[in-house]
Image (tube, rainbow, N blue to C red):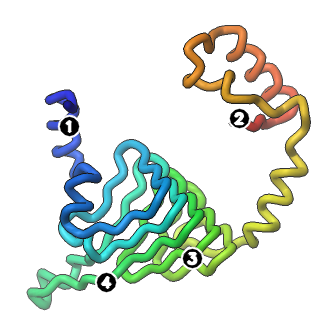
Amino acid sequence: MKNPIKKILSRIRGEQSLEKLLKRGLVVGKNFNCMGEVIIDPSHCWHISIGNNVTLAPRVHILAHDASTKVFLDYTRVSNVTIGDNVFVGAGTIVLPGVSIGNNVVIGAGSVVSRDIPDGSVAVGNPAKVVKSIDEYLKIEKEKMKSDNIFGEEYTLRNPNFGEVERSKMLKITKEVGCIYVK
């Protein structure tokens, strides 16, 4: 059972439980990872389809409706949102109504996705624009990976023995080489 205070805070923030959204018609594939404070349009969630192996980082907001027309036309514009397979949507991103995000895509943190993003792309910005292919991006990241800047799961909070020794080693390497990679 969810903590009653967390339940109240979630409701104030506009968050709905995934279970409730699924009952209303949200479609989500396998291995869906939805981090904290994500808002998936609760009033039109049946217009949203999310594929397999998708991660929504913290504070992602997915909208299937645009109420800007309501005050002027007395109608709200509603449009489908489709997110393909193998997609990572960075923290603080807003996905607007009518957008399709293809398969094998990375959307950078803080982006506003206002138009379709094709398969195999990395898109960033406001509005989000494709800046490179996923293959180019992964090639660059693989080249940055060296044996001394790769850390296993024992260097995460999933390890009950994770502590000062691990934190210190990670900080030291990060200062030396600029970035590390953690399982």
Residue under numbered circle 2: 182
Residue under numbered circle 1: 9
Report the amino acid beneath label 3. Answer: Gly
Q: Visible in this render: residue 15? A: no
The quarter of the displayed image where residue 28 is located = bottom left
Do the CB atoms of the residues marked 4 and 3 lie less than 8 Å apart? no
- The answer to whether residue 169 is left or right of residue 156 is right
x and y, in percent, of residue 96 in the image: 39, 73
Label 2 vs 3, first from the N-terminus: 3
Mark nearest the camera among 4 and 3 is 3
Label 1 vs 3, first from the N-terminus: 1
Label 4 vs 3, first from the N-terminus: 4
Classify the position of the N terminus by image quarter: top left
Tag shown at residue 102: 3
Do the CB atoms of the residues marked 1 and 2 lie less than 8 Å apart? no
Report the amino acid beneath label 4. Answer: Ser
Which residue is painted at 24% across and 49% down in the image? Answer: 17
Name, please, the residue furthest toward the bottom. 73
Residue under numbered circle 4: 79
